[in-house]
Image: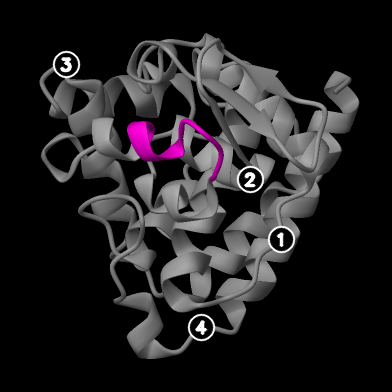
Amino acid sequence: MHRDDVWRAIDDERSSLADLLDDLSGPEWETPSLCAGWRVREVAAHLTLAHTGVGSAAVAMLRARGSFDRMVHDTAVRQAALPVAEYAVRLLGMVGSRRKAPGVTHLEPLLDILVHGQDIARPLGRSRPMPTDAAATAATRAWTMGWPFHARRKLDGFELVAVDHAWSVGQGPRVEGPIGAILLLLTGRHAALAELSGPGAGALTARLSPAQR
């Protein structure tokens, strides 16, 4: 996707997720998300931090003693103290902006909103179709970026093939499914395994055993 198309997709996803958040009940906000250790509330809070500036990021990193993972966790937990009505408002406030957090490309906000949107919607049984071109672009980024997903290493020895887009990576026994499910797999959401099939699906599921999830 062209950079402008990526930003349009980000805007569309933020707008539609804001609509979903506006519709959530109290218990839904407390539901565990697909993102391990986070409720729906923390995931939504995290997404509203996409415009964090250099100064705020530096302070948060210091508070986390230099640990990026701890910084991401702690900032989401602090942001989750806001009233839940704030999250949709803040997401909508980002629409049209091209501002990014320090140290990321324009592809990370796309990957974030697509994957975290599913982290929220799927445990709630909410339908949230993923646009295939955007999902394929995010999947390529997840496959090539290494840290934090290390998808290429973890899924080595399999060919991953989308059935709804001209996208594939890897070599080995074929594992196929919707590009949205493949994106979730690449980013460590093993709930997506249920949507995958093909000659290599059983072996891949066995490799990603509960002990490794």
Amino acid carrying mark 3 in the image? Gly
Foreground label between 3 and 4: 4
Foreground label between 2 and 4: 2
Q: Residue at x 55, y 10 (%)?
A: 171
Residue 172 location (% of width, % of height)? 51, 14
Q: Which residue is mark 4?
A: 24
Chain-order first, disc 3 or disc 2:
3
Q: Residue at x 68, y 21 (%)?
A: 168
Q: Which residue is mark 3?
A: 66
Q: Is residue 11 above or below residue 25?
A: above
Asked if the stretch drawn in magenta spans residue 198, the answer is yes
Chain-order first, disc 2 or disc 4:
4
Instruction: Judge the density around disc 3: few (<14), some (14-19), many (≥20) Cα neighbours within 10 Å.
Output: few
Q: Are marks 2 and 1 in contact (CB under 8 Å)?
A: yes
Residue 99 in view in this figure: no
Q: Quadrant of residue 128?
A: bottom right
Q: Which residue is mark 1?
A: 129
Q: Secondary structure at mark 4?
A: loop
Chain-order first, disc 4 or disc 1:
4
Q: Quadrant of residue 44?
A: bottom left
Residue 166 location (% of width, % of height)? 82, 27
Chain-order first, disc 3 or disc 1:
3
Q: Is residue 118 above or below residue 163?
A: below
Q: Which residue is mark 2?
A: 180
Q: CA distance from mark 2 to mark 4?
A: 23 Å
Residue 170 in view in this figure: yes
Instruction: Judge the density around disc 2: few (<14), some (14-19), many (≥20) Cα neighbours within 10 Å.
Output: many
Q: Are marks 3 and 4 in contact (CB under 8 Å)?
A: no
Chain-order first, disc 2 or disc 1:
1
Q: CA distance from mark 3 to mark 2?
A: 33 Å
Q: Secondary structure at mark 1?
A: loop
User: How is the model colour-coded?
Assistant: one colour
